[in-house]
Amino acid sequence: MRQLLTRTSARSGDRARLPLAALAAAASAAVTVVGLVVLTLALVVVAALDPAGGLSVGADLALAGRLWLLAHGAALQLSSGTVALAPLLLTAAVAWGSSSAARAVVARRDVVDPRGVGTVVGTVVGVHAVLTVLLALVLDAPDAAVRWPSTVLGALVLPGVAAGWGAARESGAAGDLVDRFPGPGRAVARGVLAGLLTLVGLALAVVAVALAADVGGAAALATSLGGAGAGAVGLVGLSALLLPNAAAAVLGLAAGPGFTVGAGTLVSTAGVTLGAVPAVPLLAALPDTQAVPLLAFVSQALPVLAGLVAGTATARRLTDADGGVVTAALWGVVTGVGVGVGAGLLALVGGGGLGDAGLADIGAPAIATGLSTAAQAGLAAAVAAAVSRWRR
């Protein structure tokens, strides 16, 4: 995406000498248009596999638009209740697109001054928000009403964070901002990022192992809708979009509080309660009995492992001026707390609800997950940072 935007900017931006704001607006609009087109084409392909004809192209476009809104944190009021569950894989794709758009414009025009960076970020966010709100206006209907506060907030926050990060990183402003914090800001930031990536990667591994342990159940759920290959492909695609949400739920299990899939299903190391859940292949990873699976106990090591990686990564980037072993241990604690904050945020955005009945609460408790992860990762990071500093 970034290479495509850069080449497009090189042909149309530099030759025509478009103003910086116009170039940023074009890049931001391209993200929304390309995203909706790709989603619609995917739904059209799935519908083509249905021998009964499936949805019309217009219905596929409307469904793609509603998925796009949900990815921004919007909530839809359906006849069955409020749907507010962001497919995090699509959310990550939107964030990557907005970040790439801002980075491409900054790189093409060699923007380094704060005013120019602000122009790029403001334009990318403004255009993205306007297009998202216009899409919500078009799709707002009595049978699928749009909840405007969450829609507008998500349309501003998601591209704002992504575009701000992309532009600041490309222009060098991100490093300058980190250096203004007291202490070894760059070392702590890299340690937190390393710890979070480790935590999410291990959580995805737990989901993969749980699915592999019940391949038959996942296959049965995938074919439960019938319709030749359309039902299976659609359910597998939905599971793929919700895979990061499952990883966020595992963070709650690893931290201790566990996670819920509606009012009747709770999975934690303290016990397992099973109730009715949607027929989605991803949910085959849930335990088959009331007994706590061994994998749930193994997952308890995730915050500690993430803290060890975070503390080691931080200590390796400390200089002689940053102090000795004790100081490294203290910065390790700060890094581990940062990992906990990130885990809490992931649990927050990964949860939600599907209606107002039994599936109104899905995911892990954000505050409890964040606090527990911060405590465990902080202690592990302190030990890892101290040992790594002492060995050096």
Image (spheres, grey):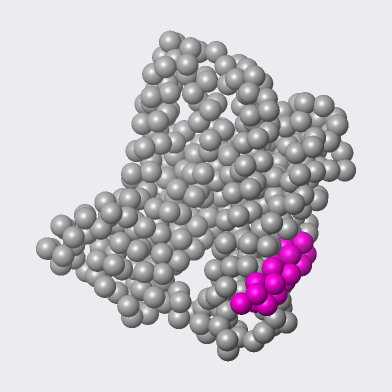
The structure residue drawn at horizontal position 64% and vertical position 19%, both measured from the top left corner, is: 216
Decide if residue 86 is on the left or right side of residue 127: right
Query: Which is more toward the observer, 313 or 353?
Result: 313
Residue 245, percent from left and from top: 62, 43
Compared with 289, 30 (above or below) is below
Residue 56 pos. (x, y %): 39, 22
**Quick check: is 389 in the magenta stretch?**
yes
* Extreme residue in the bottom direction: 321
The quarter in which the C terminus is drawn is bottom right
Q: Say if residue 252 shows up in the picture.
A: no
Q: Give 19 or 104, whichever is nearer the viewer.
A: 104
- The span picked out in magenta is 375-392
The chief SS type of the magenta part is: helix
User: Outermost residue, front direction?
Assistant: 391
Q: Which residue does the image show at 49% across and 23% down from the upper left? A: 233
Residue appearing at x 42%, y 17% in the figure: 49
Q: Residue 137: where, in percent of width, then height?
A: 45, 45
